[in-house]
Amino acid sequence: MFSGTANWLRTISPLFFFSAVCAAQAQPSGDFLKGQTVRVMVGHPPGGSYDFYARLAADMLKANLPQAAAVIVENKPGGGGLIATSYLYNQAPRDGTVLAVLPETIGNTQVLEPEIGKWKVQEMNYIGSFSPVNTAFVRRKNSPSKTPEDMKKQETIVGCTGTTAQSFQYPALLKVLGGFKFKMICGYPGAGEYSIALERGEIDLVSSAWNSWRVTHAKQLKEGDLVAVIQTGLKRNHELPDVPLMQELVDDPTAKKVMEFASAGAMIGRALVAPPRIPEERIAYLRALFDKMVADPAMKEMAAKRGLELEPTPGTVVQSYSDAIVKTPPEIVEKAALAFKG
């Protein structure tokens, strides 16, 4: 019996080792980054969760790309991330040297406002997501409205950056589809500025990424000076188990679907994305590198020391989430577009 087994092994060994060699040779190579400067672009100013994760990405890449000359972060704010998204799609080099942390809603913008979202997110290349990101509506302790039910009965002043940003659009959904008496005050440059306005009592409520709140306002949240009352996403964040999702606050089935469509980007979260038309083998290399980085205990410790959640998703899976958003039925997109106008 053993002799027969040995003969069988001898028969397949040359083929086996030839296949193994071919597989090794087929592994994607990072030689294209040798001596190059890698840019991690972020479409927001410093200080928010987009910037936090862009800097985490850059530092992880520095530790894992010894062949690169440098890895830098480039802030390109404007339009709630739209300027950076447009640049990545239309102008960024197609060689794998430019990556970006962009709004998780760029797919929504593409189908909701094609005159603004002049890109095709399905042509971009998601490398991987560091973490899903639910947006949290946070009120100050002495806000007149304490609960979502209160906010349906009396005016609540909501701070926001602009009408294309989630800080306006998510409250607008609740105002139009849920009967919330929100008064939106836009014009704040970013989350940092409207968070200060909230603490000063100029406004009652703001929405921003929970990943950012938990880092920038940990003390105020712990002491109850700031309180999360609503969240977006397709499932509740494990740190906010008692905070309802937007769609849980409405009864109409169509309204729920619209809010789920609007919240679908939460599964994309804080992700690295590359421009279109990059050679497939380079995308394969970057995706494999991302998976390796986020599994490395040293990289996990780096994120933990910064207070950043690390719940990674591979690039191909993130790509599927993004593709599903742009395939949303037109009637749901139309209702969302009307609601987003407030």
Image (tube, rainbow, N blue to C red):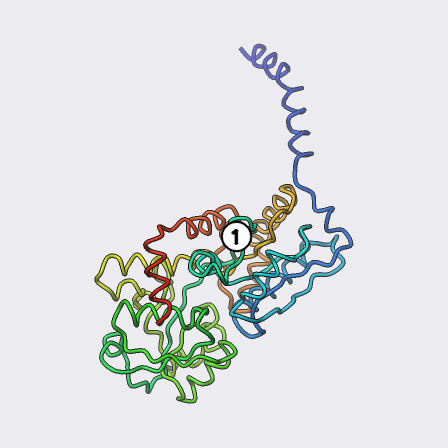
Q: Nearer the viewer, residue 3 or 145?
A: 145
Figure check: 56 above or below 153: above
Q: Position of residue 104 (x, y in %)?
A: 48, 60
| Dot 1 amino acid type | Lys
> Left of 155 or right of it: where is 284?
right
Splitting the image into 4 quarters, where does residue 333 fall? bottom left
Q: Position of residue 128 (x, y in %)?
A: 54, 52
Figure check: 282 above or below 1: below
Splitting the image into 4 quarters, where does residue 52 fall? bottom right
Question: Crowding near pointer 1: few (<14 within 10 Å), some, many (20+)?
Answer: some
Q: Residue at x 54, y 67 (%)?
A: 81
Q: Which residue is mark 1?
A: 120
Find numbered disc 1 in the image and state the secondary structure of the residue it sits on: loop
Q: Residue at x 26, y 63 (%)?
A: 248
Q: Position of residue 264 (x, y in %)?
A: 40, 57
Q: Residue at x 60, y 46 (%)?
A: 288
Splitting the image into 4 quarters, where does residue 147 fall? bottom left
